[in-house]
Amino acid sequence: MTVKCKVFISSVGQDSLHPVRLSLYDALNELGHEPIMYEKPSFGPSIPGESSVDHCLRLVRESHMYLLFIHNKSGRYLPDAKRTVTHLEYIEALSNRKFTQIFVEKTVLQFYFRDVQSQLNDYVADYEQQHGYLPDIEQIYQYVQSIQEQGILKPVGDVDPYVWAFLYDILSIHKHLVKELQLGVATEWKSFFSDILRQGIVLIPGREKAVENERLAASYQDFSEFVSAVTGMLKIERVRNLRNFLAEIRSNLKGGEIAQTLGSYTHIVQGRFRDCSAVALFKRREQFMVCEEADGRTSISKGETFDLSNPDSYVAVTYQLNDPNPLIFYKESKQMLYFTLKEGEYVISFQFPLDGGSRLQKLKGCEEHIFDGIMSANGNTLVIRYVQSVLRGLQ
């Protein structure tokens, strides 16, 4: 049974883009694909309880390919998401790793590179120097809106300021390549898709291996959960080589992304953290937390103590709070995230360095997103659950 390739055609609903959208739709149908476009029946009705925006984002997720067209209009702006609907569709495509191709009208793209890009680069650099972190897209939008209203930017024709913020996100933040679109000039869509097919052919031989790897990954997760559950039921006298044990834990905790949710629609990456750089295990002894062992790039050494009454010690705070869930701390001077958890008389701390492009100030108030990022990176959840089960056994 063959499965048609679903192609989501995204753009603002403006007259200037309708002919190119229609020609693309027709070409895709002729090629035997399944184009999804708002004006056509293929878009379908929303499901019960689904908003129009959620309907669009669901169709993006269900598609195999995402094609975006940008001219001079930005479309509907959603205050809760601080993005336009079209922008959310683009973010959803990126988040779900869809094959994405972007077409920008020629005069708009040329004006952006000639006049807008340098203005925004200077603004972002000045903002970062002043605040210590990067502005978000809403702030970039407000800035470009102000300089366009002041006449500092004078685009040819009527271009919504949000278009420039959108292009900055695409070109400067996500480093996405775009194609120039000349309205009124026919695009050879069949040749375009033929080239995509040529590029994809090389991936077909690896399909069976990818399916097998997916099956093995599911089996590994089931087994890992079983091991964690059983280990927590055992009484463990001691770990024979605690330093090596912590080293194995550290080497298996991977870096990842910290994502911010946009309203109730989708999410966007706000920062990244690198692989775990250090692990330290502490145990309570009277009124102190004593380091049992540490591994990695850390200044903490075996035998070092922390007073339980010290509110500046994240180890002491973790123990005193007695929270069953892991806690997040961070040090701005070190650009470091500290992920701690308490199990009985023990506290274990994992250090994750922030990526060079991330800034802690930007992540303040985002502890929940940081937690989700750490737990969802690669197999981190399985490793941390296993550590918890071992610590239970050591009580």
Image (cartoon, rainbow, N blue to C red):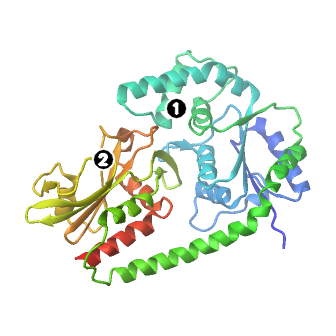
Q: Amino acid at mark 2?
A: Tyr
Mark 1: secondary structure: helix
Badge 1 density bin: few <14, some 14–19, many ≥20, Cα 10 Å: many
Mark 2: secondary structure: strand
Q: Amino acid at mark 1?
A: Tyr
- Above or below, 19 relative to 321: above
Badge 2 density bin: few <14, some 14–19, many ≥20, Cα 10 Å: many
- Above or below, 160 relative to 95: above
Residue wearing tag 1? 141
Q: Nearer the viewer, residue 249 or 229?
A: 249
Residue at 89% across, 41% down: 188
Residue at 62% across, 56% down: 96
Residue wearing tag 2? 330
Residue at 77% across, 57% down: 203
Tell me which label, 1 or 2, sits earlier in the chain.
Answer: 1
Q: Nearer the viewer, residue 236 or 288?
A: 236
Q: Nearer the viewer, residue 215 or 134?
A: 215
Q: Position of residue 310 (x, y in %)?
A: 12, 52
